[in-house]
Image (cartoon, grey):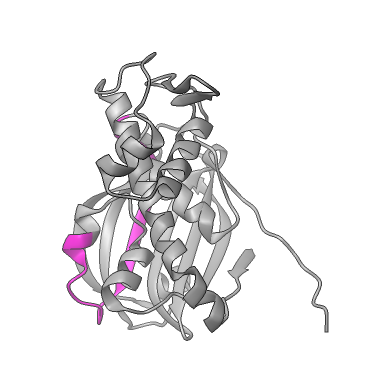
Amino acid sequence: MTTLLFSPMSATQKESDATANSSQTRYAEVASLLAKDIIGGRRVVGSLLPTELELADQYGVSRHTVRAALKVLQELGYISRKKAVGTIVASANPSASYTQSIGTIDDLVHVAATEVRAIEKVTEVALDRDLARRLEAPMGSRWTLLSGTRVDARKGKTPVAQADIYVDATLTGLTDLILKQPAILVSAIIERECGMAIDEIRQIVTAVVISQPLADRLGVAPGSAGLHLVRHYKRAGKILEISDTVYPADRVSVAFQLKRSMV
């Protein structure tokens, strides 16, 4: 079992990054909206996108946010950028792989731009012994469970992974917002609506075998390899959100860095 721990930021760093975090969330949303326009034919392949300033005005964001969103689309193969020409719509169905590399909090925001939630069921649950062991969370704790899939925004509603999201039941009034904003990280919604910063993300990665009917839903062979990712989003040691996701093994990679402590 591999556990990845994203270290908490200092209070000073949190304050200085507050505006940047909001911008990062917004660029993912802008990238998703532009991708949908390209897929839907509202921005034709071969045509020029508006300038960064025009897009900033259209979406009500900064030019920096637009530039970050365009970088995402360029990496995914939707657009190409040429000096003295502009931003050209390159493809409505790029051949980019499903693979996502997750190593930092910024990577999670990047993933949110292309893997959006498709929630199918909302229930209230208390963790029994087996579920508490699976999630490494307190037995008997109560959660709002949003169950469904993650779908590829680049390719219609193609399921990428099975995902269950658990939100602390004491955090009320968030369900409708989570359903209405499928490309925004749930943790970002919690921070925005509850006025509390997530200061630690703990990630547990295990290998699994994907059996039916999940294999059918994800379009892979029964018995194929998968990765089970459980993430704890914490504030002051308390878990506010748990994401429980199963990917086919060829659709996700997990990266981490080790740094020597200089004491």
Residue drawn at the location 83% of the way across and 79% of the way down = 262
- Asked which quadrant contains residue 141, the reply is bottom left
Residue 75 coordinates in the image, percent (x, y): 53, 33
Residue 40 coordinates in the image, percent (x, y): 25, 24
Q: Residue furthest top?
A: 46
Name the residue nearer the viewer: 14 or 16.
Answer: 16
Answer yes or no: is residue 212 visible: no
Point out the image quarter for the N terminus.
bottom right
Q: Is residue 77 magenta?
A: no
Residue 138 coordinates in the image, percent (x, y): 41, 82
- Residue 93, compared with residue 257, is above or below; it is above
- Asked which quadrant contains residue 91, the reply is top left
Residue 202 coordinates in the image, percent (x, y): 54, 70
- Residue 209, compared with residue 15, is above or below; it is above
Q: Is residue 159 magenta?
A: yes
Numbered range of the magenta stretch: 156-177
Answer yes or no: is residue 98 visible: yes
Name the residue nearer the viewer: 42 or 120.
Answer: 42
In the figure, is residue 165 to the left or right of 119? right
Name the residue nearer the viewer: 66 or 130.
Answer: 66
Point out the image quarter for the C terminus.
bottom right
- Residue 160, compared with residue 125, is above or below; it is above
Residue drawn at the location 26% of the way across and 72% of the way down = 193
